[in-house]
Image: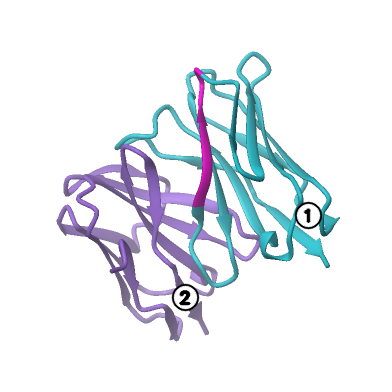
Chain colours: A cyan, B purple
């Protein structure tokens, strides 16, 4: 089955700096890679996703890159703000649609220091 | 209007008790899941249901029994609770654009 590795487990950055979180996956059949943000006491929320037919996707300060050959994908947050502090999860599955479970990485706790 | 709602949000109970967690989604999705998040924040799939039918059961003790009365509801019943069952349990539903999670149920077994 799919295995997703995520690094680093914790990350501290100064406000305004960039943060990068990296993930690798094992199953070459995976083609959907979402990223979730989990704030304290809440459920994970989708912040951005990428499909295997795309190498990069950007949404304001957040971008995700995908290298299918190397089986790794990364989350980039620019101009970090204190409200970006949270636990971030990468995930992989064969589809975004129904009945295809996500396999999650172990999470990265991001702290943005004001 | 909450898309995926779980109740209760907090549950404290003694070892050996039986408890249930309820989940409802109003998104019209066919697929729902239960995930367990341990103290290290690792999210591990427990069960998957598609249109009321069990699809995935990931080596979960049979003390855990999911029930889906209709495709909008997926409840989780746990018998003979153990200390190691303490965790946050998340319900999620899945549509074309991925997962929507509930806000979680923090279960503490004492």
Q: Which residues are magenta?
A: A46-53
User: Which residue is at 54% across, 23% downward?
Assistant: A27
Under circle 2, the secondary element is strand
To which quarter of the image does residue B67 belong? bottom left
- Residue A90, disc: none
Q: Is residue B37 left or right of residue B96?
A: right
Residues marked 1 and 2, same chain: no
Q: Is residue B106 above or below residue A75?
A: below
Residue B78 visible in the picture: no
User: Which residue is at 33% across, 42% downward?
Assistant: B56
User: Which residue is at 64% across, 48% downward?
Assistant: A106
Q: Chain of mark 2?
A: B
Label 1: few (<14), some (14–19) or many (≥20) C-alpha neighbours in 10 Å:
few
Q: Is residue B48 above or below residue B86?
A: above
List the residue tagged with mark 1.
Answer: A10
Residue A7 or B26: which is nearer the viewer?
B26
- Residue B107, disc: 2
Seen as rendered, the residue at the extreme top is: A69
Q: Chain of mark 1?
A: A
């Amino acid at each position: 089955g799919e295995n997703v590795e995520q690094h680093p487990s914790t990350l501290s950055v100064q406000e305004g700096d960039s943060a990068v979180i990296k993930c690798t996956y094992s199953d070459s059949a995976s083609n959907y890679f979402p990223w979730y943000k989990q704030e304290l006491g809440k459920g994970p929320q989708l912040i951005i996703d990428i499909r295997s037919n795309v190498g990069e996707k950007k949404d304001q300060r957040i971008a995700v890159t995908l290298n299918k050959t190397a089986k790794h994908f990364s989350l980039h947050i620019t101009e970090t703000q204190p409200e970006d502090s949270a636990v971030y999860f990468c995930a992989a599955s064969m589809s975004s649609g129904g009945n295809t479970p996500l396999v999650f990485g172990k999470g990265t706790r991001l702290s943005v220091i004001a | 209007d909450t898309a995926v709602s779980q109740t209760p949000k907090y549950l404290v109970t003694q070892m050996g008790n039986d408890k249930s967690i309820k989940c409802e989604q109003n998104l019209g999705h066919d697929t729902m899941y239960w995930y367990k998040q341990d103290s290290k924040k690792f999210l591990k799939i427990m069960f998957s249901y598609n249109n009321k039918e069990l699809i995935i059961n990931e080596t979960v003790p049979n003390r855990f029994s999911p029930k889906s009365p209709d495709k909008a509801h997926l409840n989780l019943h746990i018998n003979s609770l153990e200390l190691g069952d303490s965790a946050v349990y998340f319900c999620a539903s899945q549509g074309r654009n991925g997962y929507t999670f509930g806000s979680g149920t923090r279960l503490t077994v004492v």
